[in-house]
Image: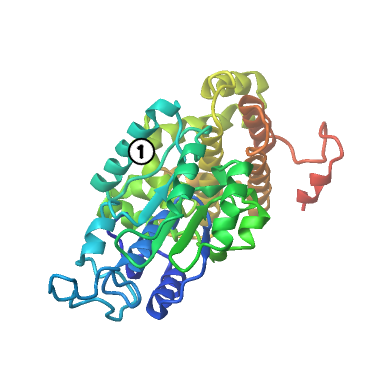
Amino acid sequence: MLTVKLASLLGQPVVSEFLRGIVLRGRYANAYLFHGPHGVGKTTAALAFARAALCERVHGAAPVDSAPSLFGEAPLAFAGAAGDDVCGECRGCRMSSTLQHPDLRFLFPLSGEEKTLETTVIETLQSMREDPLYVFQYEKAASIRISQTRELLAELGYRPHTASRRVVVVRDCDRMREDQFSALLKSVEEPGASTIWVLTTARLSRVPVTIRSRCQRVRFAPLPETLVRETLESQAGVDEKDARMLAALSGGSLGRALSMREAEPSMKDQRDAALALLAPALKGDPGALWAGVQKATGFGKAGREKLRLALEFHQLWLRDLLRTRYGAGSELLVNRDQVARLKELSARVDAVEIRRRLLVLEEALRSIDGNVSADLTLFSTLSRVGGERLGESAWPAHATARWDV
């Protein structure tokens, strides 16, 4: 994460070209807002962009002390050289690659008591230095604290320490309070020539319009599934079978795939447990289904991520079923260890029924972000997946009867 260059951003060629063009011209906007799905490289790109802006070999980024000194020392030979990316060798690059550059400020959400925040920050930064595949994981209540923004605003009143500009990177800026956004608004709107803001978010709608309108927005796309799988195999040491499953479940998010790679129980065991819940639904046994759902969700205490994962296992199973029905090779299947069963089912379940089940699952996945009960949601969804078609028999008339095609 800390040594990746703009030219090497994973799966974001458009973003890479755009940011390198900015660095090459040396004409920076007041603020940038990097937005897109979680885990697709926004923070990595923000830090790479910051390092390029602070690199002493990039045009316009010469250190303030590059002129001849009063003691007869020659100026730095590489100051002001042209370039569109970080060099990785100069003094500024060496400091920023370890997040120790005095003109690079990196803010991220924190959880815990105020008295332990400094320790948490130090431990997090050290983990980022040691692990090139570090993934931010914090509790739901994590936020960017008032003390962090207050200290930052006080620092912005002074000139940069060693470089000609200062770069402020704020990860997950949507986790700031409204009064914090109000306090930062003036600095984001008119930071002066010496400050560049880079904000990132996976929840663009939660960033106030007053902030969004003052930033140049840079959109990040989900990563291709094949790219996530290859990265897991080559850089994270995940075997091919697990990498295939993780990449399919990631939804284009390398961060999510990395956070799931050491899950307990294993992905295969979780998949088998999720798919086993469908058996009583297909048999029309609601009592057995409810008992299984209660056990799987810890009597309704399972979090949104666990519920989402259970439903996504069923989505991948149906995707493989559809591919098998229309002659796709086993190399394209996620559940490659279940080829025989998939072939058997594909002969009995047609594409219309697969589509109906997928639409039920998609509706349930959309509802997860709301205030739902894990056990009731999973029970209702699997009952509808395995039960009769909507709008028929005991089902009441409903707008979703459009699925009956």
Colour scheme used in the picture? rainbow
- Camera-side residue: 141 or 222? 141
Q: Quadrant of the N terminus?
A: bottom left
Above or below for 266 versus 247:
above
Q: Is residue 23 left or right of residue 81?
A: right
The quarter of the picture where residue 382 lies is top right
Residue 305 in sight: yes
**Looking at the image, which residue sits at the far left?**
72
Count up the numbered dots.
1
Relative to 72, is 102 above or below? above
Q: Within the image, what quadrant is residue 175 found in?
A: top right
Q: Counting other residues with Cα less than 10 Å from the Cα at mark 1, is it few (<14), some (14-19), or many (20 or more)?
A: some
Taking 216 as reference, is 8 left or right?
left
Residue 290, how many percent across, how many down? 62, 21
Residue at image location 41% in from the left, 56% down from the top? 158
Residue at image x 37%, y 58%?
47
Q: According to the image, label 1 marks what residue?
A: 121
Vertical arrangement, residue 153 with respect to residue 52, above or below = above
Q: Where residue 294 appears, x then y in whole percent?
A: 58, 20
Residue 222 in the image: x percent, y percent? 49, 58
Residue occupying image coordinates x 46% and y 48%: 154
Residue 10 in view, yes or no:
no
Question: Which residue type carries mark 1?
Answer: Val
Q: Position of residue 363 (x, y in %)?
A: 68, 44
Label 1, secondary structure: give it. helix
